[in-house]
Amino acid sequence: MELRQLNYFVAVANEKSFTLAAKRLHVVQSAVSAAIASLERDLRVTLFERNAQRVMLTEAGSALLPEALAVLDAAQGARDAVDELGQGVRGSVRVGMLAGLGLVDLPGLAGDFRRRYPDVEMRVRVESGSSAGIAAALLSGEVDVGLLGVVDTLNRELEGRELVRVPQVLAVPAGHPLDGRRVVAVADLAEEEFVDFPAGHAARAVTDRVFAAARIERRIAVEVDALDAAAGFVRHGVGVAIVPPFAVQGDDAVRTMRIKDESMEWSLHLATPRRRKPTAAVRALAGLVDAHLSRPEEALQARR
């Protein structure tokens, strides 16, 4: 078993395609197929189910994936240890984050990182769905570090640190019957239609929890897949929304107000998988994130 074989195996597992894995690795597809076939012979198992539509891990492949990632991480750690003594931080870092996340200046962070660590390739994956998608990418090895929303605590498979707490506010279109109020109760919203986020989204989890506790069933008119996508639907009267203030900040046709006596907040976390030791490149990126966070008192200030 060779590191090259494991690297090719992980690429196919992540891409679910031999063709896409070859493109990612910058090799011909036949080289990937040959490496996987050789690995399967060595292990005497079938690692992938292959058909014309998709490539999926078998039970044996699923068992191998976390072990392969651990071996590749250990090899990268050895390289990091040598590089830090001589040439400095090298390699790559893959970052996953939510689309429309207004709390992190990603271009500024990427530019700062590139200037400080020119020998590290930084790749960013923007998840248009939810924090659950980023968590899944972390656990599968598709990304090394994630910026994701958390309602309570990270699970046993992810670890990280809280960067900022994100309160939620009610957003309504200008002229709405609630326009002009600074505070509303959950009971005031029983007859409203909502613009909301998909299941697995931290903001959605907060709202679901509060309304379930109040025994109010919400009517969801539209689901949007990014934090900053709600404002347009609210502006045009499609529904009201419970969102972070930055998601509607700067929209003069949207009004926001606090929801009375409710803890409507989630946390933005920097997360990595517990079973994988962060590389030097990941540690370097983590050390720069705080400098590129929006100031909470500005980014999270509700419009009145």
Image (spheres, rainbow, N blue to C red):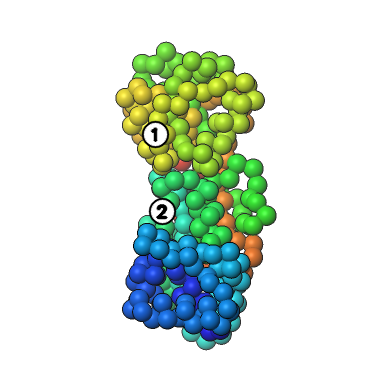
Type of the residue with mark 2: Val
- Mark 2 burial class by Cα count in 10 Å: few <14, some 14-19, many 20+: some
- Mark 1 burial class by Cα count in 10 Å: few <14, some 14-19, many 20+: many
Q: Is residue 179 left or right of residue 138?
A: left
- Residue sitting at 63 percent across and 21 percent down? 214
The image's mark for residue 147 is none
- Residue sitting at 40 percent across and 60 percent down? 54
Q: Quarter holding the N terminus?
A: bottom right
282 shown above or below 191: below
Residue 193, image quadrant: top left
> Residue 113: horizontal and vertical position, in percent?
43, 66
> Residue 86: horizontal and vertical position, in percent?
52, 86
Instruction: Give the residue furthest to the top.
Output: 177
Instruction: Give the residue furthest to the right.
Output: 156
- Residue sitting at 53 percent across and 42 percent down? 200
Type of the residue with mark 1: Ala
Secondary structure beneath dot 2 equals: strand
**CA separation in Å, label 1 and label 2:** 18 Å
Which sits in the foreground, 249 or 209?
209
- Residue sitting at 56 percent across and 74 percent down? 45
Q: What residue is pinned by disc 1?
A: 230
292 shown above or below 172: below
Q: What residue is pinned by disc 2?
A: 126
